[in-house]
Structure formats: C-alpha cells, structure tokens
Image (tube, grey):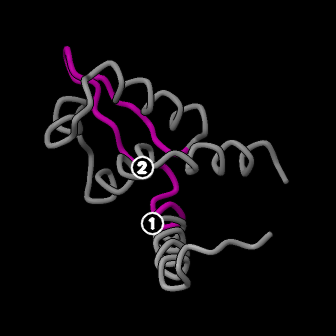
Amino acid sequence: MTDFVTGACRALAHPVRRALLQSLSTGECDVGHLCTGRELDQPTVSKHLAALRRAGLVQARVDGPRRCYSLLHEDTVRQLLAALDQLESEAMDDGGTSVP
C-alpha cells in the first residue's frame, strides 16, 4: 500500500473524522460550522481536520480570520464513506460479529 492509502485508512478509522468528512461532502465549511451540533470544541475539531489534511483528504482555504475546509478527491471520499457505512450496516445485521 502507498503512504497515501495508509494515511487515508488511518484517518478514516476515527468516527469523528468520518463524521467531519460526511459534513464536508455537502460543501465547504469553516471550523465553527463544523463544531455546530457536535459535542466537540473548536480545538478538537481543528485537530481532527489537521489529521485529515495530513492524510490528503481535505484542504483548507484561509478567508480572513476563518479557515474553510473542503474535500480533496471528492468522489473517492464519498465512495469510501458509503462503503464504510455499508460495511458497518452489514456488521450490525450480523450481530456485530467480526472476522477472527
């Protein structure tokens, strides 16, 4: 596996990061907007966004005092999120069993 794929898989392993990517799949958002409705403070969301940037899944644009984030590789990220949702749903249908 390439470093990019490894980094992307590690980033996608965290549920908060997947939720942030899901929010960004509807369009560009600033950190404040991404905090809304979550029980996470701005520094925590920023930390997760930094991990997603390092993984090459999101990009940031500075707009005055705000940082606005958007997806890189939009179609691929959406497909990965859909595949992970399907995998999770199938695991729940199987009673949460996993492969040994």
Looking at the image, is mark 2 or mark 1 earlier in the sequence? 2
The image quarter in which residue 60 lies:
top left
Relative placement, left or right, of 96 versus 26 is right
Question: Could you say which disc has been placed on residue 52 in the image?
Answer: none
The percent position of residue 53, horizontal first and vertical second, equals: 52, 34
The image quarter in which residue 98 lies:
bottom right
Relative placement, left or right, of 74 versus 65 is right
Residue type at tag 2? Leu
Residue type at tag 1? Arg
SS for dot 1: helix
Q: Which of the pair 68/100 is nearer the observer?
A: 100
Relative placement, left or right, of 100 versus 29 is right
The residue depicted at 53 percent of the width and 68 percent of the height is 84
Q: Residue 55: say if magenta.
A: no
Q: State the quadrant of the C terminus.
A: bottom right
The percent position of residue 34, horizontal first and vertical second, equals: 23, 39
Q: Which of the pair 33/65 is nearer the observer?
A: 33
Q: Residue 60: say if magenta.
A: yes
The percent position of residue 13, horizontal first and vertical second, equals: 58, 49
Is 96 situated above or below 62? below
Would you say the residues marked 2 and 1 are in contact, meaning their CB atoms lie under 8 Å apart? yes
Is 73 situated above or below 80? above
> Which span is picked out in magenta?
57-77
Is 1 situated above or below 32? below
Question: Could you say which disc has been placed on residue 78 in the image?
Answer: 1
Using the numbered discs, state the Cα–Cα distance from disc 2 to disc 1 in whole angstroms: 9 Å
Crowding around mark 1 (Cα neighbors within 10 Å: few <14, some 14 to 19, many 20+) is some
Q: State the quadrant of the N terminus.
A: bottom right
Question: Could you say which disc has been placed on residue 71 in the image?
Answer: 2
